[in-house]
Image (cartoon, helix red, strand yellow):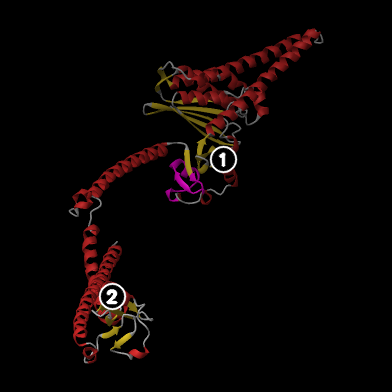
Amino acid sequence: MTRKIFRSIFAVAGTVLLTSIFIIFGCLYQYFGSIQERQLGDELFLAAEGVERNGLAYLEGLEAERYRLTWVAPDGAVIYDAWADETGMENHADRQEIREALENREGTSSRYSTTLLEQTLYHARRLEDGSVLRISESRATVWILALGMFQPIAVVLVGAMIFSGVLAGRLSKRIVGPLNQLDLEHPLENDTYEELSPLLSRMERQHRQIDAQVWELKRRQDEFSQITHSMTEGLVLLNEKRLILNMNPAAMSLFSTDPGCQGKDFLTVERSTEISHAIDTAIREGHSELLLTRGGREYQLDMSRIQSEESVIGVVILSFDVTERAFAERNRREFTANVSHELKTPLQSIMGSAELLESGLVKPGDTSRFVGHIRAEAGRLVTLIDDIIHLSQLDEGGELPYEDVDLLDIVKEVTEALQGAAAAKHVTVTVTGQATPLRSVRRLLSEAVYNLCDNAVKYNMDGGRVDVTVVPAGQGGVLIVKDTGIGIPPEHQDRIFERFYRVDKSHSKESGGTGLGLSIVKHAVQSLGGQIELQSKLGEGTTITIRF
C-alpha cells in the first residue's frame, strides 16, 4: 500500500509540475509574442511617418538589423527592401498582408519556414499615395524556445521530481503509519483517521459475528467429539481422497492406531483389500457392508457415501461389534439342531418299539422288555423337555424368591439323594465344610449343586471319589466339587457350559445325560450373581469352584 500511495503522489506531483511548466511556457510565449507584435506595429507606424515625409531617402538612411522594411508599389512591385535587391524580387501583390493593407489600410500575417523552426511576422500599412510599407521580424517557434530551454527545464524537473519523491515517501509513510498500527482485534479502540470509522465499525460487527460463529462451531465440534468418543461403535470419516478426517477411540482400537492418524491416507492405517473394495463399492453405489474378524471378535462395517449436490465429498465408516449377536445366532442354530436331534433319537426308539408291538412281531415274553424300553425313552424325553423349559425360564429372568438358606445343608441334601447312583458306580461322595448362610434362591442352588455332583458321579471312574467342600467367604460362600473322573481336554474346557455340548458323546449317551446340566448350572449361578471356575486334567479329574 505504501508503494501505491508513493507512486500515486509522485505521479500527481510529476503531472502537475509538467502541466504547470507547459502552461506557463505557453502563456509566456503568447504574452511576449503579443508584445512583439505591438512593438512591430509601433515600428511600422514610425517608419510610415518617415516615408510619408522623406520618401525613399528615409528608408535608405535607416540601419535595420532586427527589422526588415519593404516598400511595395500599389501594383505589387517592390520599390525598396532593406535586406535584398529589390530589382530581383518577385511581385508582392498576392501576399496576404499586402492585400489586406491595400483593402483595409493595415494588414498582418505570419509564415513559418520550411523547417518550422522559425516564424516570420509581417505587418503592412498603406501610405497616402497608395503604396504599402511592410515591416517583418523573425522569431523562433515555441519548439525552438523549448529546445533552447531544455537544460534549465530538465534541471528544474529533476530537482522537482527528487523533491516530490522525498515528499511523497514521507507522506506515504505518514499516511500508512497509522494504518499499520491499527489494532484489528479491537477496531473501535483505534484513534486514527475519522474517515476509517465506518470501516472500523463494520469490522467490529464482523468480529462479533465471526466470534459467535467460531463459538458455535466449537460448541458443535465439542458435542460431536463427546458423542463420537462415548460411542461404542467405531466411526471413521474420510474425504474424497480417502484422507482420515476423524476417527473415534472405538475405531482407533479396531484398526490399532492412534490420534496421529488424522490427515493420513486410510490405506496407511488399514491395508485390507476387502475394506478397500468395500469403500470403492460405497463410493460407486452409495452403500456397502462387510464382516470383519479382529482379535477373536466379529465386526460389521457399514460404509456410506457422503454427497454434496452431485459430487462425492467423502465416506463414513461405522463399525458394530456383532460378536455377541453372532455367538447367539450360532448358539441358536446349534441349539435348534441339538434339540431336534435329542428329541428325534428317543422318539425314533419309542416309535420302533411301538411298531414292533403293534405288528405282533414281539414274543409275549419280550413284551415287558419293549414296554420298559418305551417307558425309559419317554422318561428321557420328559427330562429333556423339563431341562429345556427350565433353561428358557432362566433366560427370561424375572423376579426370584430369595430367602435365607444354608449352603452346607443344601449340599448334604443333594449328596444324600445321589447316594444310590454313586453306589451303583462304586463312587464315594464326601462332604466337608462349615455352615454357610446365604441370601439366595433355594431351588436354583439345589439345581446347581445337583447337576455338578451328578456330573461328577456320572463321568467318574469306577471306584472313584467326589469331594464336595463348602467354605464361608465374607458375606457369601464357596462351593468346590472335585472328582477323580475322566477329566476334560483343554480344547473343550471353554465350551462345556454350552447347551448340548458333549466332550464324549458316546459316553454321555451311556450315562443318560441330556447335555444341558452344566448349562443349567451356568445360568443358575449367573442369576444368583456368582462366578464359576474350572480346573481339569485329562485322566486326573475335574474341580469346579463356584463363588456365591
Taking 246 as reference, is 486 left or right?
right
Q: Earlier in the sequence, mark 1 or mark 2?
A: 2
Q: Can you identify the residue that label 1 sits on?
A: 282
Name which residue type carries label 1.
Ala
The answer to whether any part of residue 428 appears in the image is no
Give the numbered dot on residue 531: none
Q: Position of residue 88 (x, y in %)?
A: 37, 90
Query: Could one spot residue 101 in this view of the protein?
Result: yes
- Relative placement, left or right, of 131 versus 416 is left
Q: Above or below — where is 311 with respect to 152?
A: above
The residue range painted magenta reads 238-260
Residue 129 place in picture, x, y as percent? 25, 80
Q: Residue furthest left?
A: 191
Query: In which quadrant of the rendered view does residue 337 lie?
Result: top right
Q: Along the horizontal axis of the image, is 177 left or right of 381?
A: left
Residue located 51% across and 36% down the image: 321
Query: Pointer 2: what residue?
Result: 101
Name the secondary structure under disc 2: helix
The amino acid marked with disc number 2 is Ala
Front residue (pair 23, 326): 23
Q: Position of residue 45 (x, y in %)?
A: 20, 79
The residue positioned 43% from the left and 36% from the top of the image is 231
- Which quarter of the rendered picture does the N terminus lie within? bottom left
Is the residue 407 above or below the residue 240 in the image?
Answer: above
Count of numbered circles in the view: 2
| Viewer-nearest of discs 1 and 2 | 2
